[in-house]
Image (cartoon, helix red, strand yellow):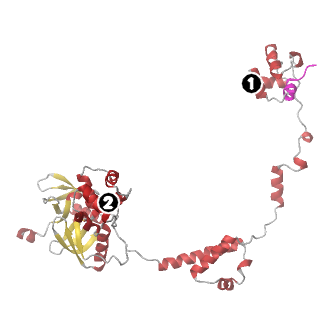
Amino acid sequence: MSENLWALREQKRMSVAALANRTGLPVSLIMEYESGQRSIDPRHLSRLARALYVEEADIKLQSDPRPSPTPSEQPPGPEGQPTPKTRGKAARAKAAPKPPAPPRPSQLAHLEILLQKLGRSTAELEAELGKPLAELDRSAVSHLLGQLQAELAKRSAATARRRPYLPESVDEFEARYLTAAQEAGDLLHFTLFDGSRLAGRVIGFGPYTITLRAEDGSEVTINKLAIVTYRKAAPATKENSS
Amino acid sequence: MSLGDYLRILRAKRGGITPWEIEAATNLPRGLYRLMEQRYRAVGDDESIHALADFYGVPFEELRWRLDWPRKALSQALAAALAQGDPITLYLSTGQVVKGKVCWWDLGAVGVDTGDEGLVVVQRHAVERWEPRADLAADTP
């Protein structure tokens, strides 16, 4: 007696994809054969029979549609329990407010350290709070820790050693001087490491170089490493006397 | 000029040999030469300076005294002079001496009001020694 294709496949515990793979037929075609939408092509019958280890005569050419399972046939959860989805919802619906958790040991240890740093005792703090620390819940201790940390930070800031501001990582002061000289068109006199002297007006500068326009109109860029000192031109009376 | 600046000049004169090559040639600990050149504070000891003096073919003393005049010490002296309004004397590597009140200073230069000549901008790398030295034991920046 011939059987539906889908029944034979399920008997052999084979997936549609596996059957398609073994027969070389498209999955969609096998699904159409199984649903009875199409009768099996005689050319494909032998391939299906070989793949399922059955005789050709065992396969119904036109399969009956597979009966759809009724809700009562759906497998229940283990031991009749609700599925995880419904269990989560039920749990949420029934969830009672949690009792306040006791403080963590690490919180209490941190509290002790902070009190030590602040020079305060546990008894003092308990007197301030009006109840022993053991009666505080986790969130209250957390809040208290925050307060004590803020107090400690305030104290540390007040007693912190103040370091002088050292502008050794900026070059803004020299840049300001050169900018002012450039804007005013001041004549600057440079002394270089090789003993030579240069005079000119700043027309540009960077971190490592200064570009000048000399009195004769020529432009020269000096590397700052080559410079020893520079200054603005001395007042006219002094310049004449020198 | 600080030891770091001077070592940089010597290295440049050698055609820009790398710090790692120098460390390999002198058996200095790895990374020390770079620190000696770049750190603002004094880095190095007599032994390492001896090795470098031999390597560059310069007298030991030529390098050694510079160790006591690091860039950080100049920063401290300039900061103190600026804060107190005291004059400072800068001895430059060209033999010039610039004396006056510090108007400003930064990474690369110092503005010194010399009075007669007005404000003179001195490049820090040209400063070899200075007077007074800041009290190093004081609030060290």
The amino acid at mark 1 is Asn
Name the spot of residue B78 as percent of width and height, x first. 28, 73
The residue identified by callout 1 is A21
Location of the C terminus of chain A by quadrant is bottom left
Residue A95 - label: none
Q: Is residue A230 magenta?
A: no
Question: Element under label 2?
Answer: helix
The chain letter under disc 1 is: A
Is residue A233 in view? yes
Query: Splitting the image into 4 quarters, where does residue A197 fall?
Result: bottom left
Prevailing secondary structure of the magenta residues: helix
Is residue A209 in view? no
Q: Residues within 10 Å of mark 2 (few under 14, many from 20)?
A: many
A56 versus B120 height, above or below: above
The residue identified by callout 2 is B37
A72 left or right of B45 in image: right
Camera-side residue of B74 and A155? B74
Q: Residues within 10 Å of mark 1 (few under 14, many from 20)?
A: few
Location of the N terminus of chain A by quadrant is top right
Identity of the residue drawn at 65% across and 85% down: A124
Q: Are marks 2 and 1 in contact (CB under 8 Å)?
A: no
A127 versus A144 height, above or below: below
Q: Is residue A5 magenta?
A: yes
The amino acid at mark 2 is Glu
Identity of the residue drawn at 70% across and 79% down: A133
B106 versus B33 height, above or below: below
Q: Which residues are magenta?
A: A1-11
Camera-side residue of A144 and A114? A114
The chain letter under disc 2 is: B
